[in-house]
């Protein structure tokens, strides 16, 4: 039987990948706050708060779906080569030949 292959999990997600999603979310929040301020009066305070809550509750699942799918698209499984793995493990366990010295 073949030996089991080892894999390395690599996430290539950068801030630039989700930057547009964050900007859109901020626009949604500011528009909901602007609509709440427009509705705010002595008799309609509950409508203003309900508007903000409704917009946030309805838009949050879309934001989370977009972020999670972006994150999952940037996860890679790379097979680890046996020779590279053994070289890394031997370099980790080998003592340093040039020890640090204090400056005098």
Image (cartoon, rainbow, N blue to C red):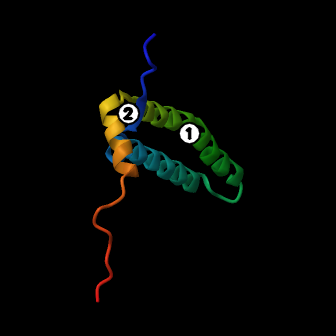
Residue beneath disc 1: 60
Counting every numbered tag in the picture gives: 2
Residue at 29% of width from left, 89% of height from top? 104
Q: Position of residue 97 (x, y in %)?
A: 29, 62
Residue at 43% of width from left, 48% of height from top? 27
Q: Position of residue 60 (x, y in %)?
A: 56, 39
Residue beneath disc 2: 74
Q: Measured along the vertical axis of the image, is residue 97 above or below residue 46?
A: below
Q: Position of residue 42 (x, y in %)?
A: 70, 59
Q: Circle 2 sits in a helix, a strand or a loop, which is it?
A: loop
Q: Is residue 60 left or right of residue 88?
A: right
Q: Measured along the vertical axis of the image, is residue 72 above or below residue 34?
A: above
Pointer 2 local density, CA inside 10 Å: few below 14, some 14–19, many at least 20: some
Q: Quadrant of residue 96?
A: bottom left
In front of the other: 48 or 104: 104
Residue at 54% of width from left, 37% of height from top? 59
User: Which label's residue is closer to the chain start, 2 or 1?
Assistant: 1
Q: Position of residue 71 (x, y in %)?
A: 43, 35
Q: Measured along the vertical axis of the image, is residue 5 above or below residue 54?
A: above
């Amino acid at each position: 039987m073949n030996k089991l292959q080892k894999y390395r999990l690599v996430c290539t997600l950068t801030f630039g990948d989700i930057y547009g999603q964050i900007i859109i979310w901020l626009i949604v929040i500011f528009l909901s706050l602007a609509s709440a301020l427009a509705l705010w009066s002595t008799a309609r305070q509950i409508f203003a708060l309900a508007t903000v809550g409704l917009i946030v509750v309805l838009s949050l699942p879309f934001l989370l779906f977009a972020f999670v799918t972006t994150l999952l698209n940037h996860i890679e499984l790379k097979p680890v080569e046996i020779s590279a793995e053994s070289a890394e493990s031997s370099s980790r366990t080998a003592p340093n030949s040039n020890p640090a010295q204090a400056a005098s």
